[in-house]
Amino acid sequence: MDRQLVPAVSPMAATVGYSRAVRDGRHVHVAGTAPIGTESTDPYEQAKRCLAIVTDALAEVGAKPEHVVRTRVYLVDAADWEAVGRAHGEVFGEVRPASAMLVVAGLLDPAWRVEIEAEALLP
């Protein structure tokens, strides 16, 4: 299988030179995904939006949430871990990928409270 790209819907994509997701053989890598398209400042709602974008990108290359083997969650406030974790668990609770939550000083847009990356391995 040739390398497949899922374009990022972001004004930064062309400048930075990245894709939302890349599939190369059995491997799928989803870039850091922010809550684009939501005005909510609620960390749970933002995480749900990130995960919707992630799962849509996975689907574009033939992957499903159950193929995800690793996620990385970036938080700007450690206190948001439970709300974001609840959204993560709604998508990956049965899958149980390896995961990490990292607290960072900030994200590109100060309104973003969370950003999520994912990696999948297809059968």
Image (cartoon, helix red, strand yellow):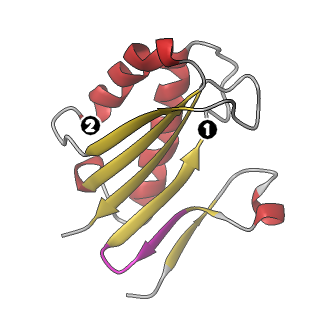
Rendered position, 99 above or below 80:
below
Considering the numbered disc 2 on the image, is that residue within a helix, a strand or a loop? helix
Residue with the mark numbered 2: 92
* Residue 55 screen position, x and y as percent: 41, 46
Q: Residues within 10 Å of mark 2 (few under 14, many from 20)?
A: some
Q: Is residue 22 magenta?
A: yes
Viewport quadrant of the N terminus: bottom left
Rendered position, 92 above or below 119:
above
Left or right: 116, with 118 as reference point: right
Rendered position, 38 above or below 31:
above
In percent of the image, x 19 and y 42: which residue is there? 95
Left or right: 95, with 44 as reference point: left
Residue with the mark numbered 1: 34
Considering the numbered disc 1 on the image, is that residue within a helix, a strand or a loop? loop
Provide the residue span drawn in magenta.
Answer: 21-26
Residue 109 sits in which quadrant? top right
* Residue type highlighted by circle 2: Phe
* Residue 47 screen position, x and y as percent: 49, 27
Left or right: 111, with 88 as reference point: right
Residue 20 sits in which quadrant? bottom right
- N-terminal of the two: label 2 or label 1? 1
* Residue type highlighted by circle 1: Ala
Q: Nearer the viewer, residue 112 or 63?
A: 112
Q: Is residue 44 magenta?
A: no
Residue 100 sits in which quadrant? top left
In percent of the image, x 33 and y 19: which residue is there? 86
* Residue 115 screen position, x and y as percent: 56, 37
Q: Nearer the viewer, residue 121 or 73?
A: 73
Name the chief secondary structure element in magenta.
strand
In percent of the image, x 47 and y 27: which residue is there? 48
